[in-house]
Image (spheres, rainbow, N blue to C red):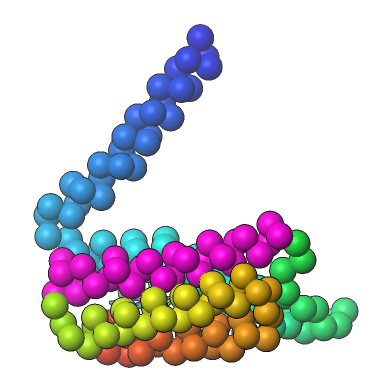
Amino acid sequence: MTLFSRGISKLSLLFLLLFIPFLSFSTEEDHSEIHDLMAHLLDPAAEAIWDSAGFVITEEGEFSLEPKNQEEWDKVLYGAKVISESAFLLSRPEISKNRKAWITVSGLLKVVGDKAFEAAERQDVEELFKVGADLYQVCVACHQTYMKD
Ligand code: HEC
């Protein structure tokens, strides 16, 4: 019985998660749509890349962030793919408002995301690190122009 009602509440939660975005979207809240894409899609995807290349230096010494097994590489592949695909999401007319510079910068996410994906497929950590820096530049390029504080 408890299992059953837990199943129900999960379903209704899923329902809410699926429909709230549409509800808020129809009220012309494109501002929060962009916020959500950034905070819950682009940012975690980029982190998957940035957290997997380079070194951290702690009191105990220097540690490589390099993925250690296929599962960790899979996370990088996933992040890279999300970055690539986000180019299309951000270029949608509702989001881009057909601004040329916005669409151009969004398109760079596809280029850089694909490069990150290829580097992760080859498990090339050095290349992934370089691509990670390029990715950061793309984020900054758009934020400098369009992010109001
Ligand atoms: C094409 C433009 C564009 C690109 C490219 C872009 N952003 Fe953003 N980003 C924005 C805008 C606009 C905002 C402000 C959103 C708002 O507050 O409504 C924003 C806000 C954010 C925020 C703050 C979200 C919040 O809490 O409000 C984060 C984090 C973020 N971006 C991460 C990233 C990362 C990481 C990348 C690169 C992988 C990236 N963005 C690339 C346009 C862009």
| Main SS class of the magenta portion in the image | helix
Q: Nearer the viewer, residue 37 or 91?
A: 91
Q: At which x and y percent is residue 98?
A: 14, 77
Q: Nearer the viewer, residue 32 or 108?
A: 108
Against 81, is 25 above or below? above
Q: Residue furthest right?
A: 60
Q: State left or right for residue 6 relative to residue 34.
A: right
Q: Quadrant of ligand 1?
A: bottom left
Residue in the picture at 38% in, 28% down: 11
Residue in the picture at 73% in, 83% down: 55
Q: State left or right for residue 71 relative to residue 59.
A: left
Residue 58 appears in the picture as rendered: no
Residue 77 appears in the picture as rendered: yes
How many numbered circles does the render carry? 0
Q: At which x and y percent is residue 15?
A: 31, 34
Instruction: Identify the magenta region.
Output: 70-97
Against 113, is 5 above or below? above
Q: Nearer the viewer, residue 33 or 148?
A: 33
Against 95, is 20 above or below? above
Residue in the picture at 27% in, 89% down: 145
Q: At which x and y percent is residue 38?
A: 37, 68
